[in-house]
Image: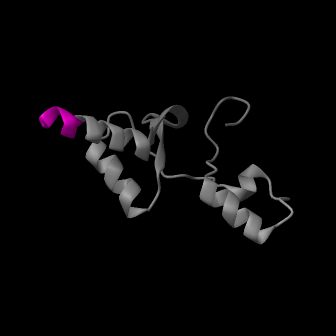
């Protein structure tokens, strides 16, 4: 986030590992190590579409941003939350 609270990038565990391969001394900044234009999802997007994006790009989380202002972070969708909800649904169906 920048000083105004706007999304400027995303740093994942994989980004950190890749940056340490490039610069073992850890000299890269977070912005240099991360992704400046991450894939995102919107609050009104269908969950299955967001999950499909995660699967197609082999990523475990998506920032949720306002559709009218994609730099305004409003939440985050992670693999764990999706799997937990699916597990609960399967449990209820049984």
Q: What type of secondary structure mainly makes up the magenta span?
A: helix
Q: Is residue 27 left or right of residue 36?
A: right
Judging depth in this view, the residue of 87 and 62 nearest the camera is 87
Q: How many discs appear?
A: 0
Residue appearing at x 42%, y 43% in the figure:
80
Render colour scheme: one colour
Q: Is residue 93 left or right of residue 67?
A: left
The x, y position of residue 64, in whole percent, is 46, 38
Q: Is residue 40 above or below residue 17?
A: above
In this view, the residue farthest toward the bottom is: 22
Where's the N terminus, which quadrant? top right
Residue appearing at x 43%, y 62% in the figure:
57
Q: Is residue 29 magenta?
A: no
When asked about the image quadrant of residue 82, the answer is top left
**Magenta segment boundaries in residue numbering:** 89-94
Where's the C terminus, which quadrant? top left
The x, y position of residue 10, in whole percent, is 61, 48
Judging depth in this view, the residue of 42 and 57 nearest the camera is 57
In this view, the residue farthest toward the left is: 94
**Is residue 11 among the parts visible in the rendering?**
yes
Residue appearing at x 20%, y 36% in the figure:
91
The x, y position of residue 53, in whole percent, is 37, 55
Q: Is residue 82 left or right of residue 34?
A: left
**Is residue 46 among the parts visible in the rendering?**
no
Q: Is residue 91 magenta?
A: yes
The x, y position of residue 38, in whole percent, is 54, 52
Q: Is residue 49 above or below residue 26?
A: above
């Amino acid at each position: 986030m920048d000083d105004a609270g706007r999304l400027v990038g995303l740093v994942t565990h994989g980004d950190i590992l890749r940056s340490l391969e490039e610069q073992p001394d850890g000299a890269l900044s977070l912005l240099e190590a991360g992704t400046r234009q991450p894939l995102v999802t919107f609050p009104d997007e269908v969950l299955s579409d967001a999950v499909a994006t995660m699967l197609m790009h082999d990523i475990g989380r998506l920032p949720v941003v306002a559709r009218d202002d994609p730099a305004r972070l409003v939440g985050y969708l992670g693999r764990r939350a999706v799997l937990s909800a699916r597990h609960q649904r399967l449990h209820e169906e049984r």
